Amino acid sequence: MSSHSRSFSHYFFYVILCLTLGLHADAQLDDNPLQVTTTAGANAITTSLSNYGSLSGPGNGETDMVWQGLGYAYEINFFVGAEVEVPPGSHADAYEANGVWKAHVISDGLKSSGGEISPDGTERWGWQPLDATDDGQQLVDVSHPDIPKKNDYDIDGDGHMDSWPREWTAWPDLWHQGDSDPRQEYLYAMDDRDNREFAYYPFENDSSRQGLGIQVTCRTVQGNRDGTQNALISIYDIKNISDKDLSKVQGGLWGDPHIGGADDWRDDWAVYDSVNNLIVLWDDDGQSLNNPSVTPGFMGIVFLETPGNPVDGIDNDGDGITDESRFDGIDNDGDWNPLFDDVGADGLPNTGDSGENDGVPTAGEPHFDLTDMDEADMTGLQAFPLTSFLDTRLEEDEKVWQLLTPGNMDVQQTPGDYPLLAGSGYFSLKSGESKRFTVAFVMGEDHDQLLNNVQKVRDYYRTHLGNFIPEHPFPLTLEGNPPYTSEVPLKWASETLTDTDSLFLLYSTNNGQTWKTYEQKLPNSGQYNVSTATLPASVFYKFKLESVNGAYLYTAISDSFFTVDNSGADNVAPEVLWDFRDGISLSGLDTLLWRDGDADGDPITRQLIVQSTVITDTLWPYNAGWVLNTADYPNGSYTLTVHVSDGRLSASSVKQVTFSNSFEDVENTYVTHLQGPSESIIHAAIADRSAIKKALYVLTFDRQDDQTTLYSVYDSTRKYYLIKNDPLPIAPESGRFFDGLTLAFDNPEYRFLPEKSGWSDSAHTNLEISMPNDAHKPLFHDLEFRFDGAACDTSINGIIAPYAVWDSFTGKKLKQYIVDLNSNGTWEPGEVISPLNEGATTDDIIWYIIFDAPDNTDPVLPEVGARYTFKVAKPLSAEDRYLIDTNILNINTNPSYPAGYALQQNYPNPFNPVTTINYRLDKSGPTLLEVYDIRGRRVRTLINGYQTAGTHRVHFDGSAVASGVYFYRLSSGGQQLSRLMLLIK
């Protein structure tokens, strides 16, 4: 169900639109610097999220509401429409009713086909993101716009969550701070001031702001509780910030689902399930075109909360109460209980705040007004019309408004590609008034699982988001001493848990990343002995008690890790957990910490592996931690792996990090292009000034058949390679180090450059060049076509040509092959020219080139002496050689520079407890590097194995040895070198 460009019908419509409106630069449409898209992927659903109301978006095939490996939507956008008064005849869709001219205005932020654009193509008439709401709530730092995330990282280490505005010191919770649900939230706001289609001016003293005067604050929520991990919930708080009341408003969704993947949109179903009040979408054949090995699931769209209409005299939600409201100061459904709910405006008991224990409901207390979604006479889903992308576009305000007439619930008859269009029905929105619209997108493997997940999401929303239940923490203690072998005795104060008969008991063995249920109906007896018979042995146990069946969310988590060892005589694998999250950035000296252990008490050994695409460094920590000097490594992405072993079984934990250190640039004047045609630019940077040597480095290159370019660095002073056939790095910080330097390359892709090519002034011709096919056997040289007479050259297949093809770099004439279309033995305009690379067969064709006159004109041949310069982008190849001369750099030379086989002094020295040892091997072979104390006793073997020629680095951790003098010895290729080092603790 998708309006992708692959669809001929959509393409045809787009062509017609372009012919009507003209083509305009997209950059003008989206030059708002506040427009930001982020990736929401905190549970089983991963999607792009944009701060103009869209989930997923055009051209997105990787984060298009992905669930279990398949995408489910091209774009889904939230809209608000309203009926307003406009000047007579001011718009083609305006109409007169009882002497008043009206129009139906819809504001949206759709980026795919159907979004509203001004006639001149320079402005989007729809949602635009805000840096702050009308009441002054800052949401975005203009200097670096982002969508704030509740549980974010401080990657840059400035003590501030990276996506948060500078002004924030805490997350602006919509719910009380006591809500401990481990969900992720994304927050942004937008308004419709740029919707200028209609002559409606919502602000009396500001005619520049149009639209409906609507501001929308959106919170997108991803939960991780049972059922909610398969759902994404969007909460839209709609506020009329204008000076005018809106008496007839509705909200809804326009979407473009593709159930089964970005290419699988031709056979989708979308049906409204009136029994369960939800839209169900699925793939007709149950097969994915994008990934046939994955079966598409079902997607459900449910309106969890819609604005109430408390003035229409209708029981809209069918709960037996007419025109109830969350804003009238009345407990409409009578569920406010003074025994449990009279806790005051902060929603928390025993804080002594306003309204606490006063015997009457107070705003903010449970089960009353805003904390009781049942007090809204919600309109729910009122319209689900069936239309097509050709018949209806969201920019057609009047047509869409009529389709959304309440009660218009069409039934799809055949599978196909249809827009998703759903509306809430009518409600009012007075000036300054806010109302809430909440939609959940829920996934399931089949229809039954979908319905089960939808119910879980409804329960979750009611207990955690729609109504806030204050958290009531209580202590949970463990009796006895670990490790526990048969039972874990739990104890808690049951008398503090009022209105609670039973509890959930859950356990975690990964520091609360996931919880598993042990008992669903544990009696609230105050104590319980947990049998370990069905539990796995682990050193990372935590227990949690939880209940939500009263006025409070009761929760308790055991204080720290404890061990369960029920293994008996069986060996248990060790365990390891990193103490930081994925994705952080490291720089300088960083202390890496983790937790490890073995449930049955076996001693363990540790390995820390630092790995990138070009480096693998294995370290041997003594304890659960390591001080890593990240400046010893090129900048870039790294995998950090801690591997622990008890000698029989092992375990690993992996984190992805980025190393980011500042390097000093070297002026390009120190880099000389010795030979070759390439116009690539080589950047050198100083990674370690103290390690720079006075030398001449020669750079050579090798272009592979797959177009990959490899480079080598040869020290011409000392006659050996420092780097041999490495892929080109794209930034200086990501290249491999050599003698304190690192390199990066601006290396273009091989292509014809029409903007730099052309005829000489004396050509006087109308011939134009075209390229019917790509290059066959590349030649990274410019060419020149020299028109020097009627029989200037003869092709290898005997065709006479009035020109010859010359290699501009070598100055040699090239052979060519000509396709003689009219078989007259002479080249004429329109016939294909194929210059040849070295050889004399069609296997050596460089380019396929045609010179021809424009359509409907006769060709005018170039005059004798004319030249056509054929320019190409020239990547690095085996023809190129560059020189880097560090003799002219202002550096301090190192007199102990190792020539060939060398062992350098450790750094730092003295050290505590970690130091780095660098060494160089002049040839590959078995290598041994050992540490001895001053009496000659071996302390540690750092390296014992085969190593390649070149520079190597190893770290020695002296945590387990005493202060003193030690020496380290390198043995390889029949040679030995030793140095002293000093450990001071």
Image (spheres, grey):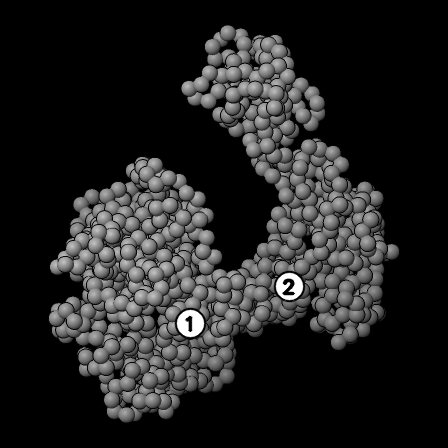
Q: Secondary structure at mark 2?
A: loop
Looking at the image, is 856 positioned above or below residue 900? Answer: above
Q: Which amino acid type corresponds to the residue marked 1 in the rendered image?
A: Gln
> Which residue is labeled 2 in the image?
587
**Would residue 846 be seen by someone viewing this image from the given angle?**
no
**Drawn side of residue 97 relative to residue 150, left or right:** left
Please name whichever residue, 130 or 74, is drawn nearer the observer in this view of the structure: 130
Residue drawn at point x = 50 percent, y = 7 percent: 824
Residue 137: numbered disc: 1
Among the 4 quarters of the image, the one containing residue 325: bottom left
In the image, residue 186 lies at what x, y percent?
41, 65
**Would residue 686 be seen by someone viewing this image from the given angle?**
yes
Please name whichever residue, 712 or 618, is drawn nearer the observer in this view of the structure: 712
Please name whichever residue, 264 or 139, is drawn nearer the observer in this view of the structure: 139
In the image, residue 310 lies at what x, y percent?
18, 72
Residue drawn at point x = 46 percent, y = 22 percent: 854
Earlier in the chain: of badge 2 and badge 1, it is 1
Q: CA distance from mark 2 to mark 1?
A: 34 Å
Check the image and name the residue furthest to the right. Answer: 895
Q: Which amino acid type corresponds to the residue marked 2 in the rendered image?
A: Ser
Mark 2 or 1: the one toward you: 1
Q: Secondary structure at mark 1?
A: loop
Residue 496: numbered disc: none
In the image, residue 979 lies at what x, y percent?
83, 62
Among the 4 quarters of the image, the one containing residue 476: bottom left
